[in-house]
Amino acid sequence: MTTLGPIELDQLGATLRQRGLDGWLVYDFHELNPIARRALSVSGMLTRRLFLWMPAVGPPRLLIHRIDLTVVTDFPGELDVYTTWEDLHHRLAGLVRGRRIAMEMSPENAVPYLDLVPAGVVELLTRLGASLVPSAPLVTQFTARWSAAEIADHRQAAEAIAAIARNTVGQVVREVGTVTELDVRGRVVEALSAAGLEWSEPPIVAFGANAANPHYEPRAHTERKLEAGDVVLLDLWARRSPNTVWADQTWMGFAGGEPSDEVARVWEAVRDARDAVVERLRVSSRSGERLTGTDLDATARTLVAGRGYGNAFIHRTGHSITLDLHGWGPHLDDFETHDTREFLVGTGFSVEPGVYLQGRFGVRSEINVVLGAEGPLVTPAAPQTELIV
């Protein structure tokens, strides 16, 4: 069966009319556009170019190649079937000429997660008479927000991986001189599997100086054996099924006694920046203030800089979470990109400030948040507050 995912067409139509748009045109080819996978659910793989047209007035239309008809059943609208490229251009011209249309574009590639329509398609549609504008507000409102079932799934996955992380780090910090990063990664993978969770890539496990690389991946020739005085970083992510949202966390430990004053200061800066973001979300929920990704990134970055580690905070504060681990909703980012999208009720994301002192150690703390009507819901329910020692 073919459905339009979570999109309520009546609400979408009203929003399009309010924004002065004739429709939202979602393009995809070989799963280039993940938003198309969210907007259009089909019973198999689509192999040719498709255009999903959702108008401000009237039923949706799916422009699809004849070869792909076998995987489209019971589409809740009109099917427009093409065969040759000339046929495709002719049908597109009839669809877009003279219309103001939203598509997945980001001016100057400002937010790459939204820049999903190839330049050639933009060129073609413009030649055929369309006036194109970015679909960013529609993407947030209609495809990036979590359903009640997805929130419930996420919360269960989040508590499961938090338990795995606490137990694993608590054991590892006592194994100085015996355990390696690959040993720990294997343990975590086994624990995730035993909990019935799925993951996209193995977790990040980093000891000491390796933790100063935000995306370090242990290899046989690079992995480190745990030494006294090492920080332990464990970044793990999982979900309960392929059709739901992810949980993504980072936990920190310290091996061989009490952490040094500097490690403690860096940990406190990272933890406090994380908590400052959550507190700002709570305050804004009460006041009605609408926050953007740039706002929340600035909240964390200002605190870290005030503690003296601003130059060592080398990535965004957090990323959207959807059916993709790094999703297409608003990111907490005014560093890598300038993300001015507003957070809406139902949007979910990570909060993960980090400080990385190259050649020495790195610290990151990551939780997840989904915005509810009453404020932010944080997972896990009991985030890490102190280094595990």
Image (spheres, rainbow, N blue to C red):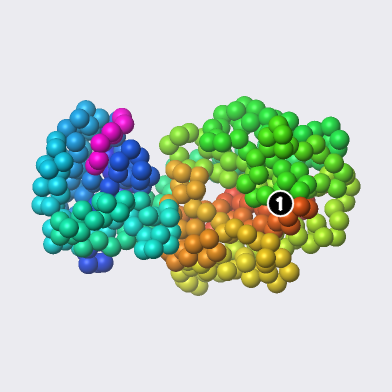
In this view, the residue farthest toward the right is 257
Q: Height in image: 300 above or below 260? A: below
In the shown orientation, is residue 158 left or right of residue 119?
right
The picture places residue 93, in percent across and down from the top left corner, at 12, 52
**Side (left or right) of 265 relative to 200:** right
- Quadrant in the rendering for residue 335: bottom right
Decide which of 229, 254 is in the foreground and name it. Answer: 229
Q: If the image is split into quadrants, where does the N terminus sit?
A: top left
Image position of 349 (left or right of 59) = right
Label 1 secondary element: helix
Residue 51 position, x and y percent, is 23, 45
The magenta-colored residue range is 44-50
Q: Which residue corresponds to the image point at 37% horizontal and 55% vertical from the top-left?
A: 115
| 228 or 163, nearer to the observer | 228
Q: Residue at x 78, y 47 (%)?
A: 208
Camera sees residue 125? yes
User: Around disc 1, counting alpha carbons within 10 Å, would you say few (fewer than 14), some (14 to 19), or many (20 or more)?
Assistant: many
Q: Label 1 sits on what residue type? A: Ala
Can residue 174 be seen from the camera position used here?
no
The residue that disc 1 covers is 212
Dominant secondary-structure state across the stretch colored magenta: loop
Q: Where is 178 relative to 104, above or below?
A: above
Is residue 258 within the magenta segment? Answer: no
Q: Position of residue 384 (x, y in %)?
A: 70, 51
Question: Which residue is pictured at 64% across the width and 70% down the height?
Answer: 302
